[in-house]
Image (spheres, rainbow, N blue to C red):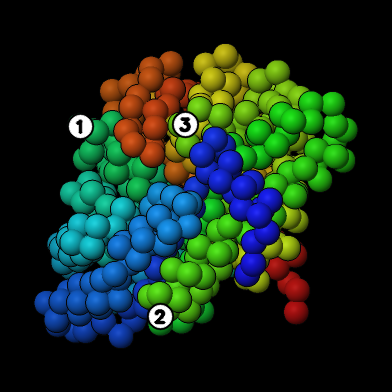
Amino acid sequence: MNFELQEMMETIRMVQIENLDIRTVTMGINLRDCADSDFDKMNKKVFDKITHYAEHLRETAETVGKEYGIPIINKRISITPISEILGNATVEQAVELAKTLDRAAVLLGIDFIGGYSALVHKGISKGDQTLLDALPEALSVTERVCGSVSVGTTRSGINMDAVRQMGVIMKDAAEKSKDTNGLACAKLVIFCNPVEDNPFMAGAFHGAGEGEVVINVGVSGPGVVLNALKRYPDADLGEVADIIKKTAFKITRAGELIGREVAKRLEVPFGIMDLSLAPTNAMNDSVAEILEEIGLERVGTHGTIAALALMNDAVKKGGAMASSYVGGLSGAFIPVSEDNGMIRGIEDNALTLSKLEAMTCVCSVGLDMIAVTGDVSPATLSAIIADEAAIGMINKKTTAVRIIPVPGKKEGDMVEFGGLLGRAPVMGVNPFSSEKMISRAGRIPAPLQSLIN
């Protein structure tokens, strides 16, 4: 992959001025061969395999980032969904395994390890239930372990038994981590149509269709896109799409170069490039501000969904041309706490929970890093999950919920999560009950478009 001088200068500008970075290099590791009826043996196998494969991940990523002048912000690991190897383990042992994963991440200097997960979109196995029961404690007593649960797919429908449980689990996890504003919930994602090669946390896991070990890369560049648009304030919307498309090409090209070099040095196959625009709390590194640059006075006003659809489509078109293997989620994230523009939209009463939900119909994921009042009921949380899963199921796309019911906080309060997770204004929820619907449980059948054979 050869770079011309002009392209190199553009890349330097994007890094130094426009917040271009490689958001994550994530190593996926298969743990299925670690399963063992003897828990202590399995626990040791998991630790040994992760620390063996990822021994040089951090130092290699940092070296490559310095050599190429493009910072790699996070070094992460995704693993086989842990429920698949739990077997007859107890809840206490499942929590112990989470501590082992955390210990491995600390030893390796890894930011997060994802895959404390269960795929229960059609039913709940014994190992799945053990993991679900362990989630609140496991995510509360660990620092770097992330979990996810798949509750629905377009092909299987929505498992409302699991959805009902997840509302209770989220409340419990928030309460167990109340000293940190319910931070355990920031490490838990509930999915519909999850992907097997997602490098982003908290929802990453190493899927059944993946190889033994792989490197997946997530690149980030909202600031680059924003600055490109600012140079063309009078462009029509077709030209705006073209500007975003060409900018996404450059961002992805840089990410592909870095990812392949890290994989080469680690002697690990290169997997995919995830094209998602992932914001941070840095100035001008905001997806919301891109939408406002397109022409919205404030994100959340009428036209927001159309602007987001335009941007998301253009990012995918440009990025797909720059990478041999596009995967993961690939679109635009709209995490409230990690995007200053989103926070401002809520504070100005332009952006509501209902509008955020509507935006997930066209963005890459779902309701992300949203703080809600601590007195929200488990049934309401479950109903929010069900709504989001329905959007994903019907539209054949990935949707997710990462909501934090902050203990003791009321609507309008501001809570700090720290670091990359940022801060968020606490949002209220609809006061009317969904209890009866959620208590029915069962399964919502798959839609007609699932019958594609």
- Quadrant the N terminus occupies: bottom right
Question: Does residue 398 appear in this view?
Answer: no
Instruction: Identify the residue position indicated by label 2 in the image.
Output: 267
Residue 413 percent location from the top left of the image: 38, 17
Residue 385 percent location from the top left of the image: 50, 45
Q: On the rendered structure, is 84 left or right of 199?
A: left
* Label 3, residues with CA under 10 Å away: few <14, some 14-19, many ≥20: some
Whole-Å distance between the Cαs marked 2 and 1?
A: 42 Å
Residue lying at the far front in this picture: please name it. Answer: 5
Amino acid beneath label 1? Asp
Instruction: Identify the residue position indicated by label 1 in the image.
Output: 179
Kind of element beneath mark 1: helix
193 shown above or below 345: below
Amino acid beneath label 2? Glu
Q: Nearer the viewer, residue 362 or 250?
A: 250
* Label 1, residues with CA under 10 Å away: few <14, some 14-19, many ≥20: few
- Residue visible at 50% across and 62% down? 258
- Residue visible at 56% across and 68% down? 272
Mark sitting earlier along the chain (3/1): 1
Instruction: Identify the mark at residue 282; answer none if there is no mark.
Output: 3
